[in-house]
Image (tube, rainbow, N blue to C red):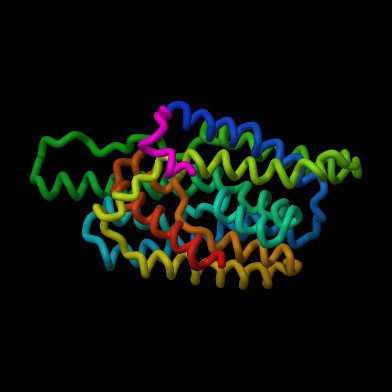
Amino acid sequence: LGQLMRGRVAISTLLLDRIVNANVHLMVTLLGVLSMWVVQIDAGLLWMPLIACVVSSIAGLFGAWRAKQRYDSPASQGSFVLCSMISNRNTAGTIAVFLLLGEQGYANARLFVAVNWPYLFAACYPVAAYYQSKAMRHHALSSNDADSEPITTSRPMIGWHTFLHPNLIPILGLIVGLVLNYQGIARPAIFDTLMPWLIPLNMWLFLVPLGYELDLQAIRRTRHDIPGLCLAKFILTPLAGYALGRLCGLSDLTLFTCVILCSSPVAIQAVVTARIFKLDHPLAMGAFMLTMVIFLAIVTP
């Protein structure tokens, strides 16, 4: 629907950003409270955030090795590594989990994706800063400009202030829901009826703006190592997630949730991060779109 609206309905980027931000800060936070309130907590479930970080880091190491083989430009290498590390678990992966496993699977998924933003700030931003510095140094050497400006990054490295980012608000929702769950307070029955409507509404508020902003022509203007990305996203990380889940003793439903989320495509945050740090963001945009198509057409079925 968002793609069909593109070119037919005039919607400002500012309005789209406000819709997405309101969805993150309000709707996702509310759903975090409601889902964690009734989730069946076992010891294995508490391993989910750690598994999410480890699997993303494994994909990032593979991406760094593959990028060094495929790309000469540090900017392109950095974008490829970010695409390997950053997965669209919060939207595409969670949709697949909800459709296949229902509300209990969705609740498990919320705990898995809770580390998305902390991991982005703590791991992905420093990696992007490293490749930006490398790209600037490469440019300075290739231009033989002895008087070039000192190499700096466009964003500071990780600091305490990054954990006050508004997009971390949903984590508070998870904590509140877990506290209510632990206290044994019953969730009002009305929410059993509302949840099957609220979760799809949450997905629509993500996907329609995303579809509206997609420029399908960008795929033709970018270079990609799609086999390498598919290997990282759809084979390596699900296998790593399955192995770690078994090692941590995850129950079947939790393990299935883990494997599905580990099969998620490249996230739009890879494109945003590449743009922030002046890397090859067209490459990231093309990789985001192509892996999303592969995820929808092949992986999810």
Residue extent of the magenta highlight: 1-12
Q: Residue at x 74, y 69 (%)?
A: 252
- Residue 118, located in which quarter of the rendered image? top right
Front residue of 120/193: it is 193
Q: Residue at x 81, y 40 (%)?
A: 191
Q: Position of residue 103 (x, y in %)?
A: 74, 53
Front residue of 25/13: it is 13
**Most prominent secondary structure in the magenta stretch?**
loop
Q: Position of residue 13 (x, y in %)?
A: 41, 30
- Residue 291, located in which quarter of the rendered image? bottom left
70 with respect to 33 (left or right): left
Q: Residue furthest front?
A: 8
Q: Residue at x 40, y 64 (%)?
A: 229
Q: How many marks?
A: 0
Front residue of 255/194: it is 194
143 with respect to 280 (left or right): left
Q: Position of residue 50 (x, y in %)?
A: 62, 57
Q: Is residue 5 magenta?
A: yes
Q: Is residue 281 magenta?
A: no
Q: Is residue 39 above or below residue 186?
A: below
Q: Is residue 292 above or below residue 175?
A: below
Q: Position of residue 116 (x, y in %)?
A: 56, 47
14 with respect to 70 (left or right): right
Indicate the quadrant containing the C terminus: top left, top right, bottom left or bottom right. Answer: bottom right
Q: Residue at x 49, y 44 (%)?
A: 1
